[in-house]
Amino acid sequence: MTEDQRQALADSKVWLFDLDNTLYPAECRLFDQIHVKMNAYIMDLLSVDEAEAARLRRHYFLTYGTTLCGLMREHAIDPGGYLEFVHDIDVSAVQPNPALDAALSRLEGRKLIFTNADTGHAENILGRLGVAHHFEAIFDIADADYLPKPDPLPYARIVEDYGVVPGGAVMLDDMSANLAPAAEMGMTTVWVRTHYDWSGDGDEEPAHVHHATEDLTAWLAGVVGAG
């Protein structure tokens, strides 16, 4: 990034961070465990085998934005029980990240978590990373009335609830599609790119992506390093 871009980022008033596969590396593969739990939930709920449960899980995700949203729409499940079940996983692959802690310490502006997961899962991850103290609040899927990113309504709600001025805000997410509504509102966007197909469309950077990185910690250090 140029020095002008770096300074503009450093002057941002609010930072909205996605959680999973953004604050920790996607290579931790926590979603491998979560998918197993989702499949088990669907198998029990609908009395189907594992292959059919996996098919339905992906169908609900592609159709509704999250498997949870699909299950709520089509089967009226209790979201709280579901989220507690699927997030009961081993998060030991997420290691403490002192470098991320240091970069966040030097990053000016308010910091919020904006996640399609629930608060309990977010707290577990932030605790493992050792960075929970940097974040003013966690805006989770319940706060969004279970409407997942990139539905525009959660973006409007977090802006309203926390007094965010979009023109002075930065949003970071590992899924490029989730950055489109933020860019439309006037936020600066950062794509924390991975090599998994759900992250984006290959190596292409859509017009709504203003910055891209494969290493969030190093990128943040670049923003604050010269300040």
Image (tube, grey):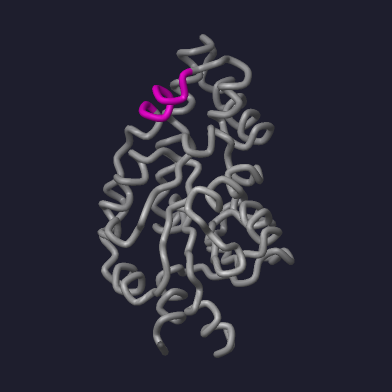
Dominant secondary-structure state across the stretch colored magenta? helix
Quarter of the image for the C terminus: give it: bottom left
Specify the segment rendered in magenta: 78-85
Of residues 139 and 173, which is closer to you in this image?
139
- Looking at the image, the residue that sits furthest to the right is 207
Q: Position of residue 77 (x, y in %)?
A: 51, 17
**Residue projecting furthest to the top:** 47
Question: Which quadrant of the figure has residue 72?
Answer: top right
Query: Which residue: 34% across, 77% down?
Result: 106
Q: Nearer the viewer, residue 201 or 99?
A: 99
Residue 151 place in picture, x, y as percent:
65, 42
Q: Position of residue 19 (x, y in %)?
A: 44, 52
Magenta stretch containing residue 182, yes or no?
A: no
**Residue 38, how many percent across, how many down?**
47, 28
Residue under the image location 48 percent in, 38 percent down: 143
Left/right placement of residue 84 relative to residue 144 reads: left
- Name the residue rendered at 29%, 40% in the picture: 90
| Observer-nearest of 62 and 196 | 62
Q: Is residue 80 magenta?
A: yes
- Residue 151 higher or lower than 95, as above or below: above
The residue that appears at 51% across and 21% down in the rendered structure is: 50
